[in-house]
Each structure stands twice: as structure tokens, then as C-alpha cells.
Amino acid sequence: MNTATFQTAPAAASSTPAVHAPERYNLYLDIHKALRSFMCDTLCRVGRLDVYDADEFAATLGQLDSLLTLCQSHIQHENDFLHSAIEARVPAGSARTAGDHEDHFESIAMLRAEAAALAAAVPAERGMRALRLYRHLALFVAENFEHMQIEETVNASTLWAHYSDAELHAIHERILASIAPQEHLLVARWLVPALSPAERAGMFGAMKTQMPPEALLGVLMHVRPHLDASGWTKLARVVGVTLDPAAAPEPVPAP
Ligand SMILES: [Fe+2]
């Protein structure tokens, strides 16, 4: 693992943006922000886990299970929609990240086995097993961070070179249509707090034109406990919600 260099798109890619220029539509960006946030939070929870607190023990392993399930689903979405799009116009163009995905499936299975062993361990063994799980989860997160950088630069540049933004938006719509409502809510819980206020405004502005008001309010209430007061005030202003930001509850350790 080389952490001293930054992976960027190939210099020959004519669509590679200059640093100061806005990128074209990047299919990977939002979901990767959600995953980075979910991974960091879960890793820290496993690291500080009190293995003798039954409620915390169950909640932390539950969150880890939720994270690993979302990671599996995310890999499948990328294989089915993004890698297939790359391969359709650049044969073998997704080979590198497709190989990563196979490794990630194996890592997820290993982490699930370690989590199950921790859950079943006698109290005297829990500390050792929790530390082992924490270290291996950290390596999984590190690998995923490098992998996502490749996807957001190299794979995104390949897509930009061979697809219009309209085509990329159409692919994104097909991905969204394939996802179950519960996964949408889980992603929203991690995605919305991970976005900048301007990105949140763009996301909810689009949702406002596509969803019934009560459904939009449901999403807002779902994510509100996870936003700080400043973030909630800015979002509520953009969406036109008049709830008192001072009444926003303290963040809770969902999902
Ligand atoms: Fe990926």
C-alpha cells in the first residue's frame, strides 16, 4: 500500500479537469462520501467498544453488520451498472477495480466471521477479539479509501470520455430505481451529513421537484438528528421547512 502518492486520472484523458475547473457529473462522489463517513464512524466505534456493555456491544456489532451489508450492495451496484457501462465501450476498462471488488467480497466475509466469533466469545476473550476485528476493519477501510480514489478519478474519467452527462444521469437513475427503500434511507442517514451545505441544497432541491411533500419531510426528519444546528438551519432554509432548529435533537448513534 502506497500512501505517499495520490492516484489521479491518466494524463492522456482529454476530459481530465484542471484542478481549478469544476468536474463533470461524477457518479461515484455522493455515495462514496456516505461510505467514507459510515466506515469512519463504525471503525471508531469498534475501536472504543466496551465489550462488557451488552447494549453497546450489540449496537456496535449491529452497525458493523449494516455497514458490511451496504458495502456488499454497493459493490454489486458498481459491478452491474458502472463496470458494465465501462466494459460496453472500453473492454477491460474496469479490470482493476473489478479485481478490487473480488478482494472486498472476501474481506467482508472475513470481517463477518470475526464479528460472529467476537459475538460468541466468552467475556475473557472479547477484548482480544475486538482488537483483532478493529485492526482488520481498519485495513479494509484503508483499502476502500484507496479504491474509491481510483474510481472517482480513473473510472470517472473513462466514463466522461465515453458517455455524455445525460447518459451518466440516466445510469444513476437506473441505479436508484434498483435500490430498496430501506437502503435509500440508510444511505441518506450517512450521505446527507457528509455533504457540504451547497451539495445538500442541490440534492434536496431536486428531491423537492420529484417527491410528495410528506415523503420529503420524512427524509428530512430521518436525517435531522445527524446534522448539527448550523447544517440543519441551512438545509431547512433551502427546503422551506420552518421547524425550530434549536429544537433539533442531539445526534444519535444510528443506523
Ligand atoms: Fe468500488
Image: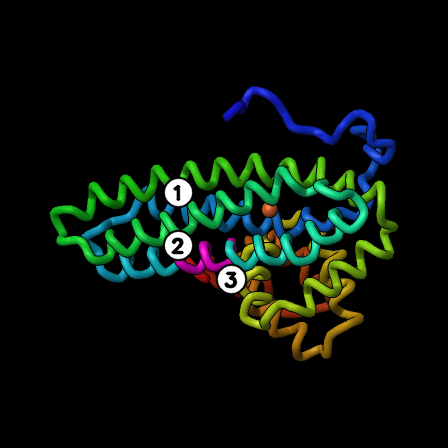
Q: Is residue 112 above or below residue 236?
A: above
> Going from the N terminus, do you reach mark 3 or mark 2 first?
2
The residue to which callout 2 is attached is 64
Magenta segment range?
A: 65-71
Compute the Cα span from label 3 to label 2: 20 Å
Residue 229 visible here:
no
Q: Residue furthest front?
A: 91
Task: Locate residue 124, reporting x and y percent.
Answer: 12, 47
Residue 132, quarter of the rendered image: top left
As drawn, 217 above or below 249: below
Q: Is residue 53 left or right of residue 222?
A: left
Q: Quadrant of the C terminus?
A: bottom left
In the rendered structure, are the residues bearing label 2 and label 1 in contact, judged by CB atoms less than 8 Å apart? Answer: yes
Q: Which residue is mark 1?
A: 137
- Residue type beneath disc 3: Pro
Q: Which mark is residue 153?
A: none
Dot in front, 3 or 2: 2
